[in-house]
Image (cartoon, rainbow, N blue to C red):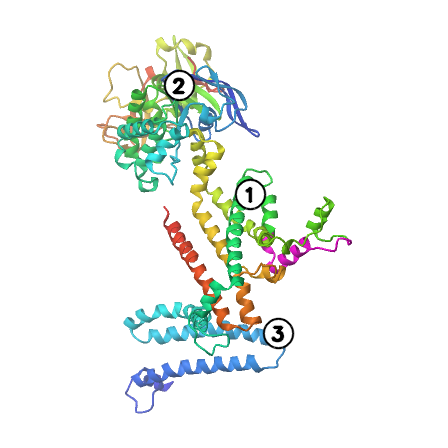
Amino acid sequence: MASVTYDHVYKRFGDVVAVNDLQIEIKDKEFLVLVGPSGCGKSTALRLLAGLESISDGEISIGDRVVNDVAPKDRDIAMVFQSYALYPHMSVYDNMAFGLKLRGMPKDEIKRRVEEAGDVLGIEALLDRKPRQLSGGQRQRVALGRAIVREPNVFLLDEPLSNLDAKLRVQTRAEISKLHKRLQTTFIYVTHDQVEAMTMADRIAVMKDGILQQLDTPQNLYDHPANRFVAGFIGSPSMNFFDAHVRQNGGGIKVDAGSFSVDIPQSQAGPYQGYVDKAVVFGVRPEDIHNPDFPPPNITPAPVSAKVEVTELMGNEIFAYFNNGGHSFVGRVDPRSQYGLDQDVQVVFNMDNMHVFDKDTEQAIR
Amino acid sequence: MAQLDQAPGSGSGFNPLEWLGSQLGRLVVSVLVPGVLFVVLWQGFIFLRDSEAPQYLIAIIAIVWGVGGAAALYFVSNWIIERLGPEWTRRLQPFVFVGPAMAILAWYLAIPTLRTLWLSFFDRTSDNFIFLDNYIDIFTDPNLIVVFRNNLLWIVFGASLSVILGLLIAVLADRSRYESLAKSLIFLPMAISFVGAGVIWNFIYEVKDISAPQIGLLNAIWVGLGGEPQAWTALLQPWNNLFLIIIVVWLQTGYAMVLFSAAIKGIPGDLIEAARVDGATEVQIFFRIMIPYIWGTIITVATTIVIFTLKIFDIVLVMTGGRFGTEVIATAFYRQNFTNRNFGLGSAIAIVLLLLVVPVMIYNLRKFGEEEAFE
């Protein structure tokens, strides 16, 4: 059990900066998810911590110990690989026992730990099998088991669910969360899937192009994205963005997107006073766009007229693709909405949950 | 043409197409076509054998005759079989395809093997049946015991040194910046024929009288260090065999290295990294992850080189001609058959060599089959 600190960490591959001034403090027993699109440096950041890549600059500490020059085997970490990386010539038992044998642990202690882990993961019946005789889900459990038996200070998981089918992924996701609660150990989990990040993490670190974009709890990340990239990355379908200007509107201010404009509620107007007549990006999530016939309670509605382009019925909701004067946007509206194609309709934006970003820096204005 | 327009059978004249369709017609054609083909091929053969036409013309005709003849034989036999009705076509057609290969294998391998076995039961002139006496000779004659000992040395040192060195170089080269250069240099001897390698190494082991300058590389170094010139391939039997074995190691290490190198590159990087995180040192990774992972390749390479060293012939013949206690099975067999004209004993030695190779071969094939089924 240990905290992990990335202190101004850089990783360069030639001219490419894969990890750029990464600063994260991960608390003991925390479940931290590193998330971002492929090539964003999240896996490299994890491999730096594992000791599989050398650090170009900065320091990584596990607990109080700087581990820059510590070999992977001496860092007291365990890693689960995307490909599982099971040793094909060893049985499941030997796969899990390998690390313990190398440490010279007594045989009966190894047996106890392996059997306990097998029991926790429900693979006790498979201990004699070879990896090639296992299904994808079983292999994934063995890979987890191999990490568990080591009882490491830090668990590193590099996209461990990517090779599973959708149903198994959801199931295993919950099991990994349970495992974290049970083991009371620091987990660092890399994924490109924002749903995995949102559902499992205590805190999420969103990365892009090697740079940490935002480090926050899932709820804060969703409610208060720090910039346009995070706003678009978290949530599905993605947030709708409109190029717009902030304008004075009588006593209040409004966002003017050209073909439509919406009033900013008085209570939230403060930060935008300085942006009057400046170019901004206005963002609203699909789930904050409603059919005025079925308005949810306690919202601050702003009406916008739109033409319906496509509708996708999900059962519990409708994904409706609208167009307003060239602006395309998607809303998740009430399933009772009777939308015909090319129909002109009124929708309302919930202005309580609106987002405004600086046009140039793309940082959230707040 | 006029007859074609008539309805079949309506004319009183002879209709060749109709006749071709009849039972008798089909039979005649079926016999005639292969007959014509056979005559054409036979005439081609006679021509190629006896003709005094210019060489290049004969070469061209030989190519046309060979390739065209094979194609024609295939087409005609396939055509005949397709005439026999679907049931027989299904039964016989596979043989059209594998038949020629089987026939060639039988003619050039199976029959000579059986004939050699038969001859090994006779005396030196193949006149008197003496059954196992030749085999008793082989395993009791002190000279022939030496032959088997030598072959054992070849197998043990030749195969193990090639495999170990090949593996070592493959692993080291894999981590080197000069990988392709190093591998090219090691692989280079593979391009040299065994006789050529023998000539090269003859120069290296060359010995001159102590008063003369040493032109052999090894003796030049040895004398330069203050030693007496040595006849390397003749001294300290049986260890002089090692000087010959080194040549094969020099030739075969490249082969082993290339296969090992490919196998090592096939080991997933994740696997090595997982072992590293699990706490394995690089040496432990080598012995406990890499070696087991490429074990199939190691077996294949080792058995291939074992078979090769069992059959070793050219190098011994070129270097020592089998003198100084360096005779091996293949040279002994050659000497009995073609120098001593003792066909019985020569054949028996060949059969012993075959019996030694077969188990290794079977193991290799079986292992190969398992590899194919692996995942």
Q: Amino acid at mark 2?
A: Pro
Distance from disc 3 to disc 2, alpha carbons, whole Å, reads 83 Å
Identify the secondary structure beneath mark 3: helix
**Residue A305 placement (x, y as % from top left):** 32, 24
Q: Which residue is mark 1?
A: B169
At x 53%, y 60%, the residue is: B147
Q: Which residue is mark 3?
A: B56
**Callouts 2 and 1 in the same chain:** no
**Residue B317 placement (x, y as % from top left):** 60, 62
Compared with residue A65, is residue B374 higher up or lower down, i.e. above or below? below
Identify the secondary structure beneath mark 1: helix
At x 57%, y 73%, the residue is: B60
| Crowding at mark 2 (Cα within 10 Å: few <14, some 14-19, many 20+) | many
Q: Which residue is mark 2?
A: A225
Tag on residue A254? Answer: none
Q: Is residue B140 visible?
A: yes
At x 54%, y 65%, the residue is: B332
Q: Earlier in the sequence, mark 3 or mark 1?
A: 3
Disc 2 + disc 1, Cβ < 8 Å: no
Q: Residue furthest bottom?
A: B12
